Amino acid sequence: MVEQAAVTCPTCFEQFLVTLPFAGESPCDVDYDCEICCRPMVISFSDDHAEASGLDD
């Protein structure tokens, strides 16, 4: 089963879903572009949680 988590873009503040990595692949950081405004960000995954931060953070 594919699990997803909601993240909020640090630029446009819109929320969207991302697919969580498989068990054993987290914690990890992934470069990602916002699904709404296309600005780059880094999403940090840990177990069943995902948090987005801007590249300037």
Image (spheres, helix red, strand yellow):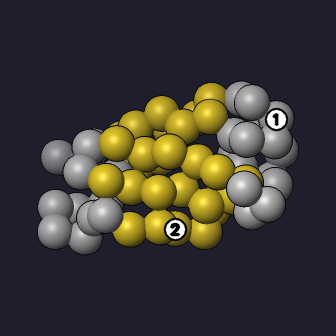
Residue type indicated by callout 1: Cys
Q: Residue 32 location in percent, x, y?
A: 63, 62
Look at 17% across and 46% down and name the residue there.
1
Q: CA distance from mark 1 to mark 2?
A: 19 Å
Quarter containing the C terminus: bottom right
Look at 28% across and 64% down and name the residue there.
26
| Quarter assignment of residue 8 | top right
Q: Which mark is residue 21?
A: none
- Determine whether, in the image, residue 14 is placed left or right of residue 22: right
Who comes first in sequence, dot 1 or dot 2?
1
Q: Is residue 40 visible?
A: no
| Quarter assignment of residue 11 | top right
| Quarter assignment of residue 54 | bottom right
Q: In the picture shown, does residue 33 fall above or below 31?
A: above
Q: In the picture shown, does residue 23 fall above or below 14?
A: below
Crowd tier of the residue under label 2, counting other residues whose Cα lies within 10 Å: few below 14, some 14–19, many 20 or above? few
Q: In the picture shown, does residue 11 fall above or below 57?
A: above
Give 13 or 18, whichever is nearer the viewer: 13
Identify the element where label 1 is drawn: loop
Q: Residue 2 location in percent, x, y?
A: 25, 48
Identify the element where label 2 is drawn: strand
Residue type indicated by callout 2: Val
Q: Which residue is mark 1?
A: 12
Look at 69% across and 40% down and name the residue there.
9
Q: Is residue 52 visible?
A: yes
Look at 22% across and 62% down and name the residue there.
22
Q: Residue furthest top?
A: 14
- Determine whether, in the image, residue 38 is placed left or right of residue 45: right
Q: Which mark is residue 30?
A: 2
